[in-house]
Each structure stands twice: as structure tokens, then as C-alpha cells.
Amino acid sequence: MSTFTLQQFIGMYCMFLFNDGSAQAGMIVNRYNVPDSKVEYFFVPEENINVYNQAKEEFNSELYADLREPIEIGQVVSATPLED
């Protein structure tokens, strides 16, 4: 999946197909890494989405960092939006 295409699914609850053949429901989020001057991408599994969103609202950066898994764009093959 291209960076441009993946950007359309940032923060959306989707079913993601990964290049290892696995399919997981969850959400892709990103952040800009200032020291490295690059955008980093993370996967938040379905079971962690509510806690992740609450931790983010409460500015609990340690907790929401623990709830996401770093990914590379090339790992994501496709995304299908799901209803909440």
C-alpha cells in the first residue's frame, strides 16, 4: 500500500491485511519524529483502541505509546473500513 493510500485510513477503525498474511482489526496512527525528520506509523489493535483514545485525551503519553505497535508502510497490503 502506498503512503498516500495509507494516509486515507489514519485514525479509522479498519480491517488491515498485512504482508505476512495476517488480518487484524484496529487503527493505524502516525506521528512526526522531529529528531529523525520522518513520519512514523503505528498499529493499535482493536482491543486497545478505547484505552488508547482515552490515554491520548488524558495526555498519558506513556500509556498510549505502550498500546501501539510500530509498523512499516510496506507491511500493510490493504485496509477495509469497519463500522464502530
Image: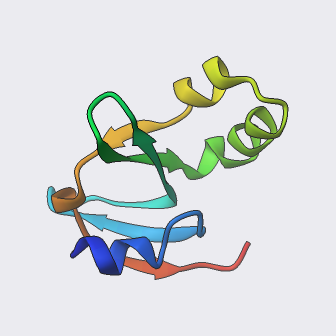
Q: Considering only vertical position in the picture, is 70 above or below 50?
A: above
The answer to which of 15 and 29 lies nearer the viewer is 29
How was the colour assigned to the protein in this rendering? rainbow
Residue 78 seen in render: no
Query: Where's residue 26, x and y in %?
Result: 53, 58
Q: Considering only vertical position in the picture, is 7 above or below 38?
A: below
Residue plotted at (68% across, 39% down): 52
Q: Considering only vertical position in the picture, is 69 above or below 8?
A: above
Query: Where's residue 71, x and y in %?
Result: 29, 45
Residue 45 seen in render: yes
Residue plotted at (77% across, 29% down): 59
**Quadrant hosting residue 38:** top left
Indicate the quadrant containing the N terminus: top left, top right, bottom left or bottom right: bottom left
The answer to which of 57 and 44 lies nearer the viewer is 57
Residue plotted at (20% across, 57% down): 75
**Quadrant hosting residue 60:** top right
Q: Residue furthest top?
A: 62
Query: Where's residue 81, x and y in %?
Result: 54, 81
Residue plotted at (59% across, 52% down): 46
Q: In the visual, does 75 lie left or right of 9?
A: left
The answer to which of 25 and 11 lies nearer the viewer is 11
Query: Where's residue 32, x and y in %?
Result: 43, 44
